[in-house]
């Protein structure tokens, strides 16, 4: 079961988006995520695509839709 309150807290505490994929590190094969010019972290390309798509704004919109 999804803890909606916990998910909301995490989304509200996260760096606001929009997020975007950054440069690929050729050595580690990771991609950086950035928001407002700040690097959030490094992950695999599949992870960064998911993270960018599931931004805090998207999560909050989904939670709001579930309340209705």
Image (cartoon, rainbow, N blue to C red):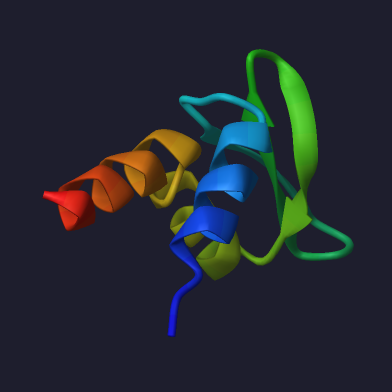
Q: Nearer the viewer, residue 37 or 13?
A: 13
- Taking the view exactly as shown, the residue that stands out farthest to the left is 68
Q: Quadrant of residue 22?
A: top right
Q: Nearer the viewer, residue 53 or 3?
A: 3
Q: Nearer the viewer, residue 23 or 39?
A: 39
Q: The N terminus is located in which quarter?
A: bottom left
In the image, residue 52 above or below residue 36? below
Does the rendering let one see residue 14?
no
Q: Quadrant of residue 6?
A: bottom right
In the image, residue 44 above or below residue 14? below
For residue 4, side relative to residue 10 (left or right): left
For residue 68, side relative to residue 50 (left or right): left
For residue 14, side relative to residue 54 (left or right): right
In the image, residue 62 above or below residue 29? above
Does the rendering let one see residue 57?
yes
What percent of the width, then of the height, locates residue 63?
31, 51
* Residue at the spot 57% in from the left edge and 34% down from the top edge: 12
What percent of the width, then of the height, locates residue 52?
48, 45
What percent of the width, then of the height, locates residue 35?
62, 24
* Residue at the spot 20% in from the left edge and 57% down from the top edge: 66
- Taking the view exactly as shown, the residue that stands out farthest to the bottom is 1
- Taking the view exactly as shown, the residue that stands out farthest to the right is 27
Total tally of numbered discs in the picture: 0
What percent of the width, then of the height, locates residue 41?
79, 46
For residue 66, side relative to residue 33 (left or right): left
* Residue at the spot 25% in from the left edge and 43% down from the top edge: 64
């Amino acid at each position: 079961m999804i803890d909606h309150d916990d998910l909301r807290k995490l989304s509200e505490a996260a760096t606001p988006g929009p997020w975007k994929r950054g440069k690929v590190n050729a050595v580690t094969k990771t991609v950086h995520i950035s928001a407002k010019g700040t690097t959030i972290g490094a992950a695999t390309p599949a992870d960064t695509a998911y993270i960018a798509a599931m931004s805090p704004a998207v999560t909050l919109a989904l939670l709001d839709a579930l309340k209705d």
